[in-house]
Image (cartoon, grey):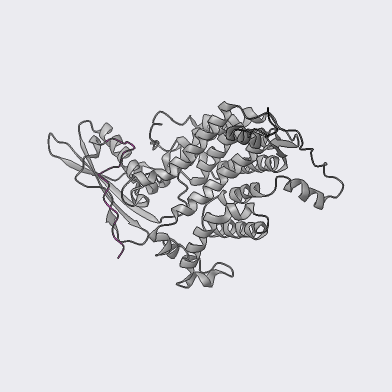
Amino acid sequence: TTATEIPMPALSRLRAALSAPVDAASLVAFRVAFGLLMCASVIRFAARGWIHELYVAPEFHFHYWGFGWVEPLPAAGMVAVFAALGVLALLVAAGVAYRPAIALFFVLFTYVELLDKATYLNHYYFISVVSLLMIALPIGRATGRAPAWALGALRLQIGLVYVFAGVAKLRPDWLLHAQPLRLWLPPHADFPVLGPLFRLPWTPYAMSWAGALFDLTIPFLLLYRRTRPLAYLAVLGFHGLTGALFPIGMFPWIMTCAALIFFPPDWPRRLWRRLSPGTCPERPVLSTTFSPPPRLLLAALALHFALQLALPLRRLAYPGDTAWTEEAFRFAWQVMLVEKIGAVTYRVRDPATGRERRIDPEPRLTLQQAKQMAFQPDMILEYAHHLAAEHPGAEVRADAFVTYNGRPNARLIDPTVDLARERDTLAPKPWILPAPPRP
């Protein structure tokens, strides 16, 4: 042997860094905030009658690709699912039976979100993804310490949401034409204080560029000590303003709390010490390291984040404007990028007799379903298959017209294609017509 120190292999150094102890206070605060916000969301959802409206009343449900077997329970069953979600959220917040509670919460919440594609929202997907990640996190009890990988995993997940939301805004409609903010802001001219600015022609452009810059930089500005205070003020302003202007539910509250994970891990302990001197527990001793994370756990985390990278980037595999075609649009953090209004009718033709009838799907769908289906090709296709099942052997074609980010009304679907013979796959759909040019 020699006195020269043998370098530790890169993987061993990485595992050592991941197992280093950090103060668990911010992770516990995240767990508590997540549980309380989820419980509040369940109560809000039930109080507005959305359980019955979205999952019990509809005669037909739009399914996600590969999940056509997922169906809603009867009314009492759906109420029980939401009641269970509320109780599980409180257990998560309290840290009681944490892992079983968060695992079952993930399963039930994801089940509800798979019931109908018409109810998709980015923040519902965010809740599913974060609750899945939280199953792996050792934050069930306030032990004072946690491994660094737990904090890093949450920061990475939330950072990816912001960054990909910013990347999605790097498109001509958002940056060069300030769409859809040019359509959305003028109706809010009576908004307190800022309302008159929304009438000015330059305001949508300024807000579009500011929104893209915010999303692309905010995780990094929150991590850096010198910029953190102003960055969090920007978080409060950004999410507060978007929540006040647009109907996006709990999303501003969720992201405002989630952004705190970028603060130093002991921030709740220091805040409590300032608010209640002498009552805060002592800062935990961090000298002892945790055991390195098992390889199976590292593999699971690697797979999780590989998917979180691949899903937003998959739109590069599709031709044309994916905000128009909706291909690879979901699960990609493409937040508030489009204003689309559509109308669709079907032509059902009996090839034996040549007789054709027009069918308006709206009376048989909920308002939410009809609104979403009218501009989403995969939903138009699924309902065409439903009509084909009702009329065996019939040809089904769609006359679908959509207005998109201020463009003229244009056809979305090739009207000559028999949708009853088309299949929903992950491949690009040639029967979706190109987006109309901007005048």
Seen from the viewer's position, the closer of residues 308 and 119 is 308
Is 302 on the left or on the right of 227, as rendered? left
Seen from the viewer's position, the closer of residues 91 and 432 is 432
Judged from this view, the residue extending furthest toward the right is: 278
Q: Can you see residue 43?
A: no
Seen from the viewer's position, the closer of residues 359 and 331 is 331
Image quadrant where residue 353 sits? top left
Image quadrant where residue 169 sits? bottom left
Residue 272 in picture, x, y percent from top left: 79, 48
Q: Can you see residue 382?
A: yes
* Residue depicted at x 49% and y 46%: 122
Residue 437 in picture, x, y percent from top left: 29, 60
Residue 432 on the magenta segment: yes
Q: Which residues are magenta?
A: 423-439
The image shows residue 154, relative to residue 294, as above or below, that is: below
Seen from the viewer's position, the closer of residues 319 and 91 is 319
- Counting labels gives 0
Is 413 on the left or on the right of 63, as rendered? left
User: What is the magenta segment's predominant secondary structure?
Assistant: loop
Image quadrant where residue 11 sits? top right
Residue 195 on the magenta segment: no
